[in-house]
Every structure is written in structure tokens, then in C-alpha cells.
């Protein structure tokens, strides 16, 4: 089973001559994680080399895993014990690299991120569906523009041993294929013949209900219920330094009303996150469809002058901020608004704020 393999791999790193990590990209979405797990498991089972340990390496800190709510769901369904997975902050990869024992299979990316670039000499194999950046002279390379890397993993396994091992493995691969192709929707335009072939095989051979799995994954992906306010703030977060100021932008898919109901102490979480990231201002951008598409905005800063000035600037530049229709906390650190300008996504708001800071520094 997947489990015992993973368990052994996490705790016996020192007993093996070669540590062969199978690693997805740093965004570490469901495709990267599930593909790494299934492929590492397969390589480990089919290798006839006792000195080499194949291990899926999840390319995010362990504490961030719970933010991938769709993965939390799918891994539970696939009976994966998350505490047995190895995350990037639980291994001293530099040390293994320096000892000359490291091999790498790159999954779901074909170029290492900047911080991991020094490992490039260890790459043995690449399995990916992004554009080939031809970064390394690796012979064992499979790069095809299919909908999901999981499709390539399934195909490799079937080519070599005929079938996927069990329903858990099939489910782990079906999940990312369904999410990445948006359940094979024409509009998304990400489906290829190979994705269809693989999902047809999986749904038939393992009696997996494709629509049911997709709907549930889609729901779980945006489900904020299991997350604390602090985790909602960091789930989809970006920050920019603008002049001398540090700005943070959290996107959240829960209405202000439901969020405050779920956690009346929301501002304390915002304060904690603001402080931890040494921010000057935090923009909490809320979007939801209930039933109409709505945007709300919470401005948070301990600099009351800045808070007031940013608010005035947004109003002067078409933000259409209005008081919310619900009761909100009265707090000098924060402003709660209904955002009339629903065109202002984070991508659109960020340059407006950039301009604001450029103007005041003149
Ligand atoms: Mn992918």
C-alpha cells in the first residue's frame, strides 16, 4: 500500500545510499502533489535496487498543506496519512545533496525554482506538461502538453506494468486530471486525447464517478469552513513593497457576513498576520457569488493616517466603497466596505495602490 511505503521513507533516510526524491513544483497544487506521490510509489516498487530510496517530496512547508483544502479531502479519500508525507521543511536536502546521495525526478515542472537551482545536476528524470524550457540536459524526459501531469503518470505506469495498482492510486490521479481540465469542459480548453483515455480507463476500471469526484473537489477547493481566519488570510496572499511601505493583499472567498459570524475575532487574526509580515497595510479582498457576484474590502492598518488616506484615494479613483449592509466591528485599525467597483480584482487594485504610494512619496 501507499501508506507503508511513505511511512518507511520518512524515517529511514539514513539507511539508504541514494535518496531519490520525486518532487513537484513550488506552487504545489494537487497535480504536483498527487503525481509525485503516485510516481514515487511506482518507481520504488518497480526498482530493483535496494540501495535507492524513492520518496515523494512535497515542495511546500508542512504547515501550508492544510491550505490546499482540495488535497486534504482527496488524500483522506485515498487513505494517505499526511503526517507520513515528507515536506520540504522536514528534510535537509542541501545536506543530502552535499553528501552526493541525491537524485531527483522533477514532476509537473521542468525547471527548478531559483532557490533550488543548485540541485540541477541531480536531475535524473523529468515528467511534465508545461512548456519545455530546455533548462537541463536530461535524457529521461517526458514533456507533453496534456491537461494534467497526472495523465502522464498514469500513462507511464500503464505502459510499464499494464494497470494502476488500486482504487486509491486511481483516485489520486483522477482528482488533478478532473480539476485541471475543469471536468473536461470545452470552455476551459485544457483537455487532450490522452487525458480522456486515462480518465476513461480510471472511471471504468475502478468504478470512480467522475462528476461526483469533480464536484466535491471543486467544492473543497473553495471551502473556507475548515480554515481559521489566519489561514484564510494566508491561503491566497501576495505582497508588494511600494516605496518604503510594505503592502499585503489577501483574497478570500467568504462573505464578510459569514466570516464575522464564523469568527467575530477576525481583526485579531488580521492584526497577527499584519504584524507577522511587518506590513504597513493589509487589503483583505473578499469575493463571492451569493447569488450575485459581490466584492467587499477590509482595509487594515495600525497607521490611522495611512488608513484614512488610502480610503480617500480609493474613493477618488473609482473604488465606490460603501458601508456594508451588515453590522461590522467598529475598530480604529480597520475599515469595512462594500466594494461597488467589482472590476477591481487584486490584479487591478494593486497598480492603483502602487500609484498611491508613488504619489505620496513625491
Ligand atoms: Mn500540473
Image (cartoon, helix red, strand yellow):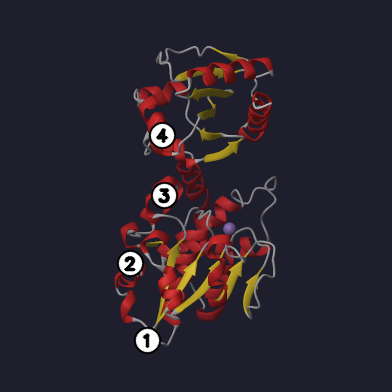
Residue behind label 1 places its C-beta within 8 angstroms of ligand 1: no
Locate ligand 1 by image quadrant: bottom right
Q: Residue at x 37, y 39 (%)?
A: 226
Which residue is the site of mark 3? 64
Q: Residues within 10 Å of mark 3 (few under 14, many from 20)?
A: few
Tally the marks. Answer: 4
Q: CA distance from mark 1 to mark 3?
A: 32 Å
Q: Which mark is residue 91?
A: none
Which residue is the site of mark 1? 50
Q: Which one is closest to the eye, mark 1 or mark 3?
A: 3
Which residue is the site of mark 4? 275
Verify CB contact (< 8 Å) between mark 4 and mark 3: no
**Closer to the camera in the image, 330 or 259:** 330
In primary-sequence order, the first of circles 1 and 3 is: 1
Where disc 2 sits, the SS reads helix
Q: Quadrant of the C terminus?
A: top right
Tell me residue 48's x, y (percent). 42, 87
Relative vertical location of residue 157 with respect to residue 311 in this rendering, above or below: below
Q: Residues within 10 Å of mark 4 (few under 14, many from 20)?
A: some
Q: Which one is closest to the eye, mark 3 or mark 2?
A: 3
Tell me residue 279's x, y (percent). 48, 34
Amino acid at each position: 500500500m501507499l501508506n507503508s511505503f511513505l511511512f518507511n521513507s520518512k524515517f529511514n533516510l539514513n539507511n539508504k545510499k541514494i535518496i531519490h526524491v520525486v518532487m513537484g513544483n513550488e506552487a504545489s497544487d494537487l497535480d504536483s502533489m498527487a503525481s509525485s506521490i503516485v510516481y514515487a510509489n511506482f518507481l520504488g516498487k518497480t526498482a530493483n535496487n535496494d540501495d535507492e530510496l524513492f520518496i515523494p517530496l512535497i515542495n511546500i512547508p508542512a504547515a501550508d498543506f492544510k491550505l490546499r483544502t482540495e488535497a486534504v479531502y482527496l488524500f483522506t479519500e485515498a487513505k494517505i496519512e499526511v503526517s507520513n508525507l515528507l515536506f520540504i521543511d522536514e528534510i535537509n536536502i542541501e545536506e543530502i545533496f552535499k553528501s552526493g546521495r541525491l537524485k531527483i525526478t522533477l514532476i509537473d515542472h521542468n525547471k527548478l525554482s531559483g532557490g533550488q537551482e543548485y540541485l540541477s545536476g541531480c536531475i535524473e528524470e523529468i515528467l511534465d506538461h508545461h512548456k519545455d524550457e530546455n533548462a537541463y540536459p536530461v535524457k529521461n524526459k517526458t514533456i507533453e502538453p496534456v491537461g494534467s501531469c497526472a495523465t502522464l503518470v498514469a500513462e507511464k505506469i500503464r505502459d510499464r506494468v499494464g494497470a494502476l495498482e488500486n482504487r486509491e492510486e486511481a483516485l489520486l490521479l483522477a482528482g488533478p486530471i478532473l480539476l485541471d481540465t475543469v471536468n473536461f469542459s470545452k470552455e476551459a480548453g485544457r483537455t487532450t486525447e490522452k487525458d480522456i483515455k486515462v480518465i476513461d480507463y480510471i472511471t471504468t476500471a475502478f468504478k470512480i464517478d467522475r462528476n461526483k469526484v469533480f464536484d466535491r473537489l471543486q467544492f473543497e477547493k473553495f471551502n473556507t469552513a475548515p480554515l481559521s481566519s489566519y489561514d484564510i488570510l494566508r491561503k491566497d496572499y501576495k505582497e508588494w513593497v511600494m516605496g518604503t511601505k510594505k503592502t499585503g493583499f489577501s483574497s478570500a472567498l467568504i462573505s464578510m457576513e459569514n466570516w464575522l459570524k464564523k469568527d467575530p475575532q477576525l481583526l485579531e487574526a488580521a492584526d497577527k498576520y499584519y504584524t507577522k509580515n511587518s506590513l504597513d497595510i493589509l487589503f483583505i479582498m473578499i469575493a463571492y457569488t451569493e447569488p450575485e457576484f459581490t466584492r467587499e474590502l477590509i482595509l487594515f492598518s495600525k497607521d490611522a493616517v495611512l488608513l484614512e488616506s488610502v480610503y480617500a484615494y480609493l474613493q477618488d479613483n473609482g473604488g465606490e466603497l460603501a458601508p456594508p449592509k451588515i453590522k461590522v466591528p467598529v475598530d480604529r485599525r480597520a475599515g469595512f466596505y462594500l466594494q461597488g467597483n467589482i472590476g477591481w480584482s487584486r490584479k487591478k487594485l494593486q497598480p492603483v495602490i502602487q500609484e498611491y504610494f508613488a504619489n505620496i512619496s513625491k
